[in-house]
Image (cartoon, grey):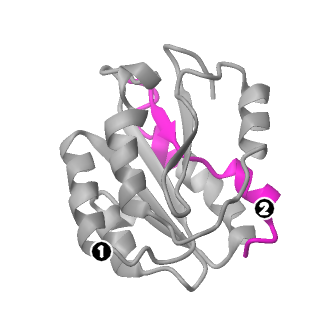
Amino acid sequence: MQLGPNKVQVSAVTFGTGAKNQFDLNQYSDKAALEAAIMSIQYNGGQPALANAIRYVTGSSFSPLHGGRADAPHVAVVLTNQPSGTIDTIKLQSQTAKDNGVIIYAVGIGNGVNMNELQTLASDPDSRHLYTANNFDALSSLKDILATKLCNGMCVLFYIYILAFFLFISKHENYH
């Protein structure tokens, strides 16, 4: 993965209780610095504010102010391990995101996730955009699958934004 203003850009938004931008798409062009930034993200806990996160991502994260580019696909990879409890709001915000060209991959972790929420959140078809892992340790098996799906057909023709990530999960093993 090559990082840069005209290559892959990565942003991170956490969404425990509220949505919080950790860093912008245009902040890192060095892979080691990006990985260090991801590893330094603190787990804040709380009830996941998934709808707020999707609204934030759609309205802010992909904007030019935060490094967004109109000529690149906007891709969000959302990882969650518990239900948000706001399915109607998730439906509204995820549909708004999709209507604005955001491709959403949903990853549910553990048995506490609400599959209806994940299906509502994920872009269609679910077979391509919805994944589950039994626990945080099992996420590593999804990394290569997601990387292939994210780049399949897009990385050759377009530059891709990847919003969210799975690298930081390995640091937070005690949050199973």
Residue at image x 67%, y 60%? 44
Check disc 2 and give the amino acid type: His
Question: Is there any visible trace of residue 149 in the rendered image?
Answer: yes
Dividing the picture into quarters, in which one does residue 89 lie? bottom left
What residue is pinned by disc 2?
172
Residue at image x 21%, y 55%? 95
- CA distance separating discs 2 and 1: 27 Å
Check disc 1 and give the amino acid type: Ile
Query: Residues in magenta?
Result: 148-176
Q: Residue at the far bottom: name it.
A: 111
Element assignment for label 1: helix
Left or right: where 89 falls relative to 37? left
Q: Does residue 155 belong to the magenta stretch?
A: yes
What residue is pinned by disc 1?
87
* Residue 158 locus on image (x, y percent): 39, 24
Element assignment for label 2: helix
Q: Residue at the far left: name it.
A: 99
Q: Is residue 105 above or below residue 159?
A: below
